[in-house]
Image: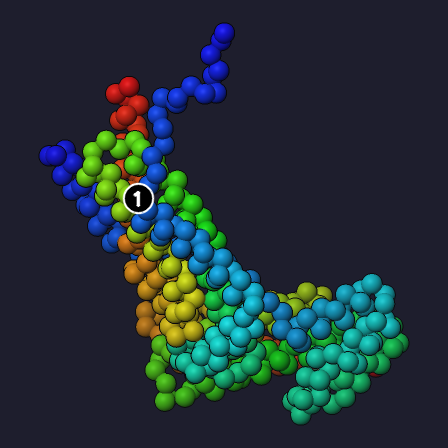
Amino acid sequence: MARDTRAFGVAAAALIVLFTATPGWPHHVGTYTARDNAISANFKQIKFSIQAGKFDVARSLFEDGALRKEMLARAGRLPPGLPDTVANAIRARDSKTAEAALALFFSALARDLAREADARLADPGTGADARVAAGGKFLEAIWRYWNLIDFAVSERDPKAAVAMRLAFEEAETESQPGPRRVATAADPARLRASFARVARTLSDVIESLSAVTRRNS
Amino acid sequence: MPADRTTEPAPTTWTLPPLGALLVAIVLIACAEIGGAAMVRFKIDLARWARSTMLRHPAVHGLVGVRDVDEQVLDEALVKFDAGLRLFHMHAEGMGLVIIGTTMVAVTLTASPVSRRVIVLLLTIGGAGYPLGYLAWSALIPYHGIERGKTLAEWFCWGPFGGATIVAMWWLTAVVAARMVRR
């Protein structure tokens, strides 16, 4: 009986240790891989069709897809006639111009997000930590779009592509908590400066890609 | 005439676990099956409910009101919400069988009545409570977010119930090992 009591005591102690320790061991509940949205999925379909030389397929995917709809919805913030530039390039089997015009569109999407993030960070109605956390989410969205066109931009304007990556890394460092952030406390002003740099770099990318599409169309 | 070896009594016969433990295990497996069926039947309704609840708690999920940003946040939460339900289904099925198997070993091989009772109790309660943590996590995600929901599930389900099962399993291991040494 005494042995039972001792065993029970040991088990109870082990249980207490486990109970207090387990929340420190994060449960593995699977990983999440970011999925394409309708625009990026449509972009990939068009890109791969062009790369495979299936220009008729690419044209119909562009004409009926989410990407063109989004281009038309944002027409005011894009170089004039961008949807026509893409459609004409596909029709002419000009993959380089089509790729440049599509890269331009995603650069514009990413730049708009950087500007929106900057505006949100400037809003004093929200706490500094919440603003910086939201900035991090904007950065993730910007990177998702940039990632789609990184290679295409690097081919045409390697300096701009490197500048964009550096600006992004700087913003990422400012937005992440812990040792990676340079400042100890969340600092929306520093993150704003990083977003401004990202937006400026993307504007330069848009400018250089516009020149390419104008020259070729 | 040589003896028929198949009819010889075994050196040890398995003892049935307490009916309460068996009932808990079977109810757990039944819940797993209902959970799996409900996941398929109400997949869209569940996703709609989770999405609308998350949209009602934008601050919890860090939603900023920009489609390109929010759609990824919502998608991740919905994927994890679904993963929680799947993990509940899988763990409840598995732990039901674990309860049956391990309590049977405990009642058969543990000589001390107190140890036997405690081991069976820990295995039954721990085994039944642990899978519920995944269900709780899923239910908590729309209201508290992925990480906060996980922390709550760890404190109230995975930690205590999983801990109880682990302690009972090692205790049972010690009992079986001691029996082997004594033999």
* A206 w.r.t. B31: above or below: below
The quarter of the displayed image where residue A95 is located: bottom right
Across and down, in percent, residue B88 comes to: 44, 58
* B97 w.r.t. A78: above or below: above
Chain letter belonging to callout 1: B
- Give the side of residue B27 with respect to residue B72, left or right: left
| Residue occupying the point 88% across, 76% down | A92
* B113 w.r.t. B57: above or below: above
Label 1 sits on a secondary structure element that is loop
Specify the quadrant that holds the N terminus of chain A: top left
Query: Pointer 1: residues within 10 angstroms few (<14), some, or many (20+)?
Result: some
The quarter of the displayed image where residue A66 is located: bottom right
Across and down, in percent, residue B29 comes to: 44, 53
User: Between residues A180 and B179, which one lies in front from this camera angle?
Assistant: B179
Q: Residue furthest right?
A: A92
Q: What residue type is labelled 1?
A: Pro
Is any atom of residue B25 visible in this view? yes
Total numbered labels placed on residues in the image: 1
* B87 w.r.t. A149: above or below: above
Say which residue label 1 marks: B18
